[in-house]
Amino acid sequence: MGILHILPRLALCVMMVFALRGAANAEESALTRLDTGDASRGWNAVGRLNMGTRSFCTGALIAPNLVLTAAHCLFDSKTGARINSDKIEFLAGWRNGRAEAYRGIKRAIAHPEYVYGGGDKLTRVSFDLALLELDQPIRMASILPFETDLSPHEGDSVGVVSYAKDRSEAPSLQEVCHVLNQEERLLVLSCNVDFGSSGAPIFSIRDGVARVVSVVSSKADYGGAEVALGTSLQGPLVALRASLAAESDAFQKANPALRDMETGAGTTAKFVKP
């Protein structure tokens, strides 16, 4: 997950963010490693995505056969080439050398407006979203797909579950971080993310239910302070599922859960293993 230096039109926004961040920091929780069955209960639909043999991202199950992640994860960071779907593996609930479920990827679709390495960085953030169709659905009581929800607002509390550099063998939960600023499709977040957190689900909790509202794209540096960038799902996920449906009408009919998703999008981050 490369560090993104925020572009001029976001500079003022981020300067305002730090005034809010001081108050938010007092309430933010630390990362908690989910390395036991009890600790990870309810979060097993988050998994590690092995992208070929050199890198990994984080993804979340949002239907029995669909994983949501960041579009840039589908590309080799060294060559820019698209990674073949048959080289990608989803390890649901991966922790300490084993997963709750292992699945290959039948096909992977990036948002139709996402261009790897092209356009300005903020535009890439806005469309950095991908759906991965599993080779077999996951239907297990211990792995329940997450619902998606509309975008949170500035000041709202959110949480994140992710894998990352130095914590690739078990997911970590940050139960409370905050939306520091919100633009049309871009969220500036106080969440603790690092290389490998690309594609990690950002959650809001409403009525006791965790729902995915954003996908981690990048961490950003501004004046030596780090923030996370993500994309609200509202809009881009609708376009992404339409692209998926256009490829296969039978796929959409076989997966009515797709018709209930009202949201979507992501940006730029991937950890390359040594």
Image (cartoon, rainbow, N blue to C red):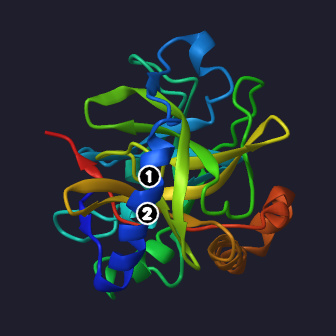
Residue 210: x and y in percent read 72, 40
Q: Quadrant of the C terminus?
A: top left
Residue 211 seen in this snapshot: yes
Say above or below: 51 vs 34. Answer: below
Give the image quarter of residue 169. Answer: top left
Identify the residue at image location x=45%, y=21%: 95
What residue type is disc 1 on?
Answer: Arg
Residue 165: x and y in percent read 27, 37
Say above or below: 1 vs 75. Answer: above
Of residue 80 and residue 19, the one placed in the foreground of this image is 19
- Secondary structure under badge 2? helix
Q: Crowding at label 2, few (<14), some or many (≥20) Cα neighbours within 10 Å?
A: some
What residue type is disc 2 on?
Answer: Val
Of residue 256 and residue 41, the one placed in the foreground of this image is 41
Rendered image: mark on residue 99:
none
- Secondary structure under badge 1? helix
Identify the residue at image location x=36%, y=85%: 9
Residue 127 seen in this snapshot: no
Q: Is residue 273 left or right of residue 226?
A: left
Q: Quadrant of the N terminus?
A: bottom left
The reply to whether callout 1 and callout 2 are in contact (CB within 8 Å) is yes
Residue 120: x and y in percent read 33, 85
Q: Is residue 166 left or right of residue 241?
A: left
Q: CA distance from mark 1 to mark 2?
A: 6 Å
Q: Is residue 7 left or right of residue 158?
A: left
Say above or below: 181 vs 167. Answer: below
Rendered image: mark on residue 21:
1
The residue tagged 2 is 17
Say above or below: 182 vs 117. Answer: above
Q: Crowding at label 1, few (<14), some or many (≥20) Cα neighbours within 10 Å?
A: many
Residue 229: x and y in percent read 42, 62
Identify the residue at image location x=54%, y=28%: 93
